Image (cartoon, rainbow, N blue to C red):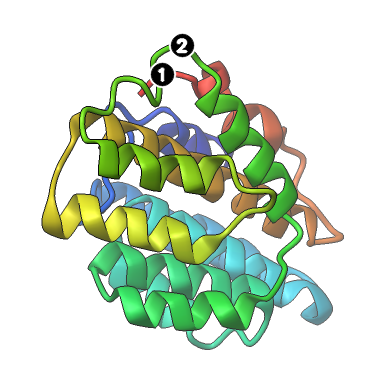
Amino acid sequence: MMELVRQLAGRKPVQVLRPVQVWNGELDASIAAVIGGWAEQVEAKYKPYAHSFLSGMHLWNDSLDASHTISQDIHTPDGSYWHAIMHRMEGDYWNSKYWYKRVGNHPIFTELHLAVFEMSKEPGVLASVGSDRVKSELESLVLSDRWNSDRFVDAVERQVEKERHEAAVALLERIQWFETVLLLRHCYRGVGELPDINLNAALMIGGRTET
């Protein structure tokens, strides 16, 4: 199970904002078999967390349909969160915002906001964005007093659908990576009976500061 996480955490380049096909079909089958089997074996009270973790792993592998099939039946903030990310990745931005509203104030938001703020302080991260309009949009996202999922969706939509600035895309892809990692870790920790693996080390392989 840890090896599956490591493969996805170590993807280079990182996951794009708008995946068009499954990244690794063989890996997707392993996710379904290994993590899906584990999710079915945990106690009933932990299954929403386990299935959320499974949905997230499929999504990290660009397997949007497999992830959606699972997340749409998880009636928790975590399930809604994966549902929201999936719709953002497929380009259904309004629907993504709807599911983010269903999430509410998720426990990972504080840590995600802090991570994004720290990214913004790295030399050249915002300065390298050539368009003043795009730079202003990104500043409103990273320098706000709390995490704003709608602003993130809007920023992704602009770069995917309207205008592409490589520096902006690189920053948004890094943010997406941390959002995925934090949500996977949260879902995994929600399961009380954990397999004997060091998930945190697998997720944070290499510190993941590169793009």
Whether residue 51 is visible to the viewer of this picture, yes or no, is yes
Quarter of the figure that contains the N terminus = top right
The residue labelled by disc 1 is 210
Is residue 79 toward the left or the right of residue 128 in the image? Answer: right
Q: Quadrant of residue 11?
A: top left
Per the model, the C-alpha gap separating discs 2 and 1 is: 14 Å
How crowded pointer 1 is (Cα within 10 Å; few <14, some 14-19, many 20+) is rated as few
Residue 125, x across and y down, in percent: 40, 22
- Which residue type carries mark 2? Pro
Q: Residue at x 63, y 46 (%)?
A: 182
Looking at the rendered structure, the kind of residue marked 1 is Glu
* Residue at image point 42% right, 34% down: 7
Q: Would residue 112 be found to the left or right of residue 194 on screen?
A: left
SS category of the residue bearing label 1: loop
Residue ID for mark 2: 123
SS at circle 2: loop
Farthest-out residue, top:
123
Other residues around mark 2 within 10 Å, as few (<14) / some (14–19) / many (≥20)? few
**Residue 87 position (above or below residue 72):** above
Name the residue located 39 percent from the left edge and 62 percent from the top edge.
153
* Dot in front, 2 or 1: 2
Residue 92 higher or lower than 209, as above or below: below
